[in-house]
Amino acid sequence: MLDQLPELIDPVVFAERRSHLRGRLSMQRLDRLAGFLFDDKGELNVDLQFYKEGKVPVIEGRIEGHLNLTCQSCMQALAWVVDKPVKIGMVQTIEQADRLTEEFEPMMVSDNKMSLPGIIEDEVLISLPDYPRHGHKCLQYEPAVKLAEPLEIEQKPDNPFAVLETLKNTGDQ
Ligand SMILES: [Zn+2]
């Protein structure tokens, strides 16, 4: 297994050679994805086969791994499993895109050099939820005793529940 995935790839050359890329990517190499993550922990395992479908270079494979999203309710880490099948046809014209079998997702290629981490980032980004949240009620029904923890201090002041909890707490003291 390759430990080091290349930064730049030439899809045509890779497809002609029927290259098979396998390797691991750490989050530190994925700048755009980083904006959606809680931290840089996690990694992605990439297994991609390059070949030609007619005249079009294609990539088929899978991206698997785990990362930490930010829960949009409590703003804490939300462990997320990535399991994204990849089936991309790298086309240079609209006509090529139209002729491509439906199972392939067309990707416009203008240059012979493409960023492999960039392709992987795009695939992972489209697989992420728009509004990641913990499956359980991570915020609304937290017991009042947890108010002293940093998690609660970071609450927005306009959260009506926070105000109520504060009033209740003051009354108890
Ligand atoms: Zn949460």
Image (cartoon, rainbow, N blue to C red):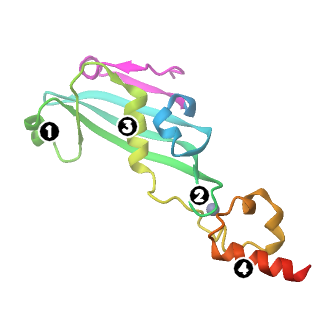
Residue 164: mark: 4
- Residue 30 included in the magenta stretch of the image: no
Q: Which of labels 4 and 3 is toward the front?
A: 4
Label ID, residue 42: none
Whole-Å distance between the Cαs marked 3 and 2?
29 Å
Q: Is residue 35 left or right of residue 140?
A: left
Q: Is residue 83 above or below residue 5?
A: below
Range of the magenta residues? 1-25
- Name the spot of residue 145 as percent of width and height, x first: 84, 71
Query: Separation of disc 4 and disc 2 at Cα?
Result: 23 Å
Residue wearing tag 2: 71
Q: Secondary structure at mark 3?
A: strand
Q: State the residue position of label 3.
A: 61
Q: CA distance from mark 4 to mark 3?
A: 51 Å
Label 4 element class? helix
Residue 54 percent across, percent down from the top left: 13, 30
In this picture, residue 134 sits left or right of residue 169: left
